[in-house]
Image: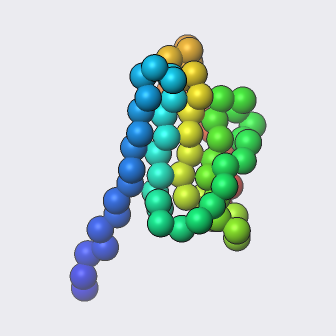
Amino acid sequence: MAKVKTRMKVWFDREGDYLEVLFDSKTPGFFQETKHDQVMQKVDSTGRVLGFSVLKISQLKKKPFEVALAG
């Protein structure tokens, strides 16, 4: 049985205070809100989660924090 390699892309912009993690960067998708006002999820047209982003990441005081993503 062949092992499946899972790759993700992580982007951190210190100046913009922004973190983005993509599990699938090849599938087209769009960002939508989550219940956490600083977290957006990227989904495809079927609602499958492709990644997420965190705005103002340095301002998060509660560590760790939990956010439910669609999927």
Near-viewer residue (15 or 20): 15
Answer above or below: position of 12 versus 4.
above
Answer above or below: position of 52 versus 46.
above
Numbered marks: total: 0
Q: Is residue 57 left or right of residue 41?
A: left
- Could you tell me residue 25's position as x and y percent? 47, 60
Residue furthest out toward the bottom: 1
- Could you tell me residue 66's position as x and y percent? 59, 35
**Res. 69 visible in picture:** no
Image quarter in which the C terminus is found: bottom right
Image quadrant assignment for residue 7: bottom left
Answer above or below: position of 60 versus 69.
above
Image quarter in which the N terminus is found: bottom left
Q: How is the image coloured?
A: rainbow
Residue under the image location 29 percent in, 68 percent down: 5
Residue under the image location 57 percent in, 22 percent down: 56
Image quadrant assignment for residue 35: top right
Answer above or below: position of 8 versus 36.
below
- Could you tell me residue 2's position as x and y percent? 24, 82
Residue furthest out toward the left: 2
**Res. 7 visible in picture:** yes
Image quadrant assignment for residue 62: top right
Q: Is residue 35 left or right of residue 44?
A: right
Residue under the image location 50 percent in, 22 percent down: 17
